[in-house]
Amino acid sequence: MYNQQAFACSGDETQLIEKPATVNLHDNLNRDSMHLKITIGETILTASLIKSKTTDDFIKLLPLNLTMNDLFGREKYGALPKSISTDATPSYRYEVGDIGYWSPSHDFAIYYKDDGETIPSPGIIIIGKIDSDIKAFSVPGSVKIKIERID
């Protein structure tokens, strides 16, 4: 995590403005990352996972069949069969393609559109990123998916 800093100037005054800390997911993904296959109908997507206790717990639930509901026209979410670790730093922002865990209702979420809004408290725990085209999620209503680990 890091804090971005910016400076605002007005006349003779300079003010330091800090933006909220964000996770640079691409720094945490590498060639050694674990990968997923996500099937939506006839469409197959791949995803890379970051290494964390939350991700380890998630992997133990696979394979999974989930019904993913739509929220705010930006994400699809579905309930995991049980809660998983929250031993990670939450994020209040997301990028298109992010895969996250929403702990209050133990939901798995995939973000397919950026609406400029932040995530409410307690934030999401980002566990990975979709590697392929996300448009399969950009449909109205719910979708049924299958999530499997790729070895």
Image: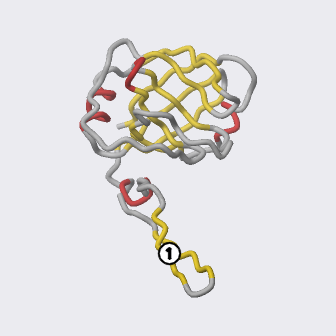
Q: Residue at x 43, y 57 (%)?
A: 24
Please state the horizontal and vertical placement of residue 86, each as a whole percent of the image: 28, 32
From the viewer's side, name the closer residue of 42 and 66: 66
> Which of the 4 quarters of the picture holds residue 35?
top left
**Residue labelled with disc 1:** 15
Report the side of 28 relative to 56 (left or right).
right
Look at label 1 and name its amino acid.
Gln
Circle 1 crowding by C-alpha within 10 Å: few under 14, some 14–19, many from 20 = few
Please state the horizontal and vertical placement of residue 34, each as a whole percent of the image: 35, 42
Report the side of 12 relative to 3 (left or right).
right
> Which of the 4 quarters of the picture holds residue 63?
top left
From the viewer's side, name the closer residue of 11 and 37: 11
Q: Residue at x 52, y 37 (%)?
A: 119
Please state the horizontal and vertical placement of residue 81, each as a whole percent of the image: 37, 12
Report the side of 8 relative to 5 (left or right).
right
Please state the horizontal and vertical placement of residue 22, each as a whole percent of the image: 43, 54
The mark total stands at 1
Rendered image coloring scheme: secondary structure
Q: Residue at x 51, y 29 (%)?
A: 109
Dot 1 lies on which element? Answer: strand
Question: Compared with residue 69, is residue 54 higher up or lower down, i.e. above or below?
Answer: below
Instruction: Name the residue at the bottom extreme.
Output: 12
From the viewer's side, name the closer residue of 143 and 150: 143
Quadrant location, the C terminus:
top left
Quadrant location, the N terminus:
bottom left
Instruction: Name the residue at the right extreme.
Output: 140
Question: Compared with residue 13, is residue 103 higher up or lower down, i.e. above or below?
Answer: above
Q: Residue at x 55, y 33 (%)?
A: 110
From the viewer's side, name the closer residue of 116 and 17: 17
